[in-house]
Amino acid sequence: MPLVLGIETSCDETGVGIVRDRVLLADAVASSVDEHARFGGVVPEVASRAHLEAMIPTVQRALQTAGVTLNDLDAIAVTSGPGLAGALLVGVAAAKAYALALDLPLYGVNHLAAHVAVDVLEHGPLPEPAIAMLVSGGHSSLLLVEDVTKTLLPLGQTVDDAAGEAFDKVARLLGLGFPGGPVVDRRARDGDPRAIPFPRGMLTDPSYDVSFSGLKTAVARWVEKHAGPIPVADVCASFQEAVVDLLTAKAIRACRDQGVDHLLIGGGVAANSRLRALAEERCAKAGIVLRVPRPGLCTDNGAMVAALGDRLVDAGVAPSPLDLPADSAMPVELVVA
Amino acid sequence: MLALVVDTSTPAVSAGLVRVGADVQVVAETVVVDGRRHGELLALGVREVLKAGTPDLVVVGVGPGPFTGLRVGIMTAAAFGDARDLPVLGVCSLDGLAEPDSAVVTDARRKEVYWAIYDAEGQRVAGPHVTTPDGAQAAIGDRRVVGDGALLYGFATEQEPRYPSVRRLAEVAVRRHLAGEAALPLTPLYLRRPDATEPGAAKKVTA
């Protein structure tokens, strides 16, 4: 039963997770989100600096929680892409040094595949093939998962902004601060999702691609033209409804077209309460089994990297070479670099 | 004492195993000059020099230097030290270039240089700073200049040594350590703030 330590630094969370045989033993996360708030988005240099400061303490915290030592480990896994280049590089350097010093195999893994793999910790093995929808501040992807240890097939993605980015931009124009996801979700609870008919970009397009840039502009336009106080709750609810309506419609269609009866949703936007509710409703109607990890496992973390590493060791996949690069544009088809 | 030394503060990706005792001896060393591949190359270099022995401590140049590459060296040293439970000593990378009565000038990009001045005993008496080459020249005067910024910005017609030596870094760090001086913390000597500005009001989308 391999003991795997996973390191995640692709954006603004320094995550270290420890997994043994599909059981989560520790999930330590240090976030630099507060340092980015005044800039209205993640600043790569600020994130990279924070990763370097947080790495060793976060590793130590994870080891303590798991009740293991570095010498107990059997493998090191690390997100090697996609993500912010400078941020990835800090995690990859740490992972290489641990692997080298402890003489352990090193797995440079795909961030998106890790978002898929994390669900095994909560709901057991994912029946494959499955459709995965990964939605966050950096990604909006629909993937066909035939074997998460081998490759992921991209079906569709955003043609412009990521879903989470749209939440951030709308929150900013409403003066709600950064990050936008949680606050828009909260304010939307008191609003009417049908109050304003915002557009669903590419809803009728036959592809599995989505678009959020027109929606963001439509919200800005509506807010600028509105006379009197802005009904923030209604704007939030109507905007959010447009996003989740589009996302779930495309995901359900992908399941039907591909003849797949399991849908997995991951990424930071999967923490959105309305997305979870609408996806449940539509999956139930369509006879699709929905799997969404708890919010703490949907946002970026080290547990997901350890979970994928654990699967890779289990499947006998060859480890990565020590000259493994940090690849900011790592293709989703590549699970291990 | 056998020191594992790494420095990534310049285009040179350096790893070494250096014995520091009554004299200083480089047991193994790898240097590859490739300023865009610190992340790929450093661990290979460390693996190579470790074939020559087992270190008792780790020494790392903490800059100043271009940030992205610099972090690779510091993160590598810190994690290696954590894994092997070894002390990790941070040292100013410019000290690894210094000679008595000299100034060290390295490339800080953006038409600026990192620099420091050393006295007749080889002790740093000014810097590290980041300024324009003109600003550095005014402080340095007619001292001998070494480092890869020397030729690049016309401080000298030759610039050897160009990059910090693992030998010198180990010697400086270990001697200070044995003398009871605190090493530098394992955080880069950035000398510059992150290049980010707070956003203004959102652009209007309606006419």
Image (cartoon, grey):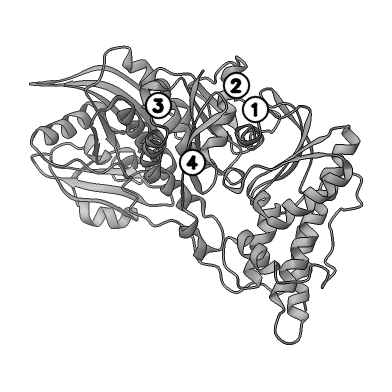
Q: Mark 3 or mark 1: which comes first in sequence? A: 3
Q: How far, Cα to Cα, is label 4 from label 2? A: 19 Å
Q: How far, Cα to Cα, is label 3 from label 1? A: 21 Å
Which mark is nearer the camera, 2 or 1? Answer: 2
Please state which amino acid type lies under the numbered disc 1. Val
Q: How far, Cα to Cα, is label 2 from label 3? A: 18 Å
Task: Check contact, mark 2 vs mark 1: CB within 8 A.
Answer: yes
Q: Which label sits on residue B7?
A: none
x 77%, y 57%: residue: A243
Q: Which label sits on residue A312?
A: 2
Q: Which residue is mark 4?
A: A15
Q: Residues within 10 Å of mark 2 (few under 14, many from 20)?
A: many
Viewer-proximal residue, A30 or B93?
A: A30
Quarter assignment of residue A22: top right
A322 relative to B188, above or below: above
Element under disc 2: helix
A46 relative to A218, above or below: above
Q: Which residue is mark 1?
A: A335
- Judge left or right: residue B105 versus residue A199: left
Q: Are marks 1 and 4 on the same chain?
A: yes
Quarter assignment of residue B12: top left
Residue A147: where, in percent of width, then height?
72, 24
Q: Mark 4 or mark 2: which comes first in sequence? A: 4
Residue A207: in sight, yes or no?
no
Q: Which residue is mark 3?
A: A98
Q: How far, Cα to Cα, is label 3 from label 4? A: 15 Å
Q: Chain of mark 2?
A: A
Residue B18: where, in percent of width, then height?
22, 21
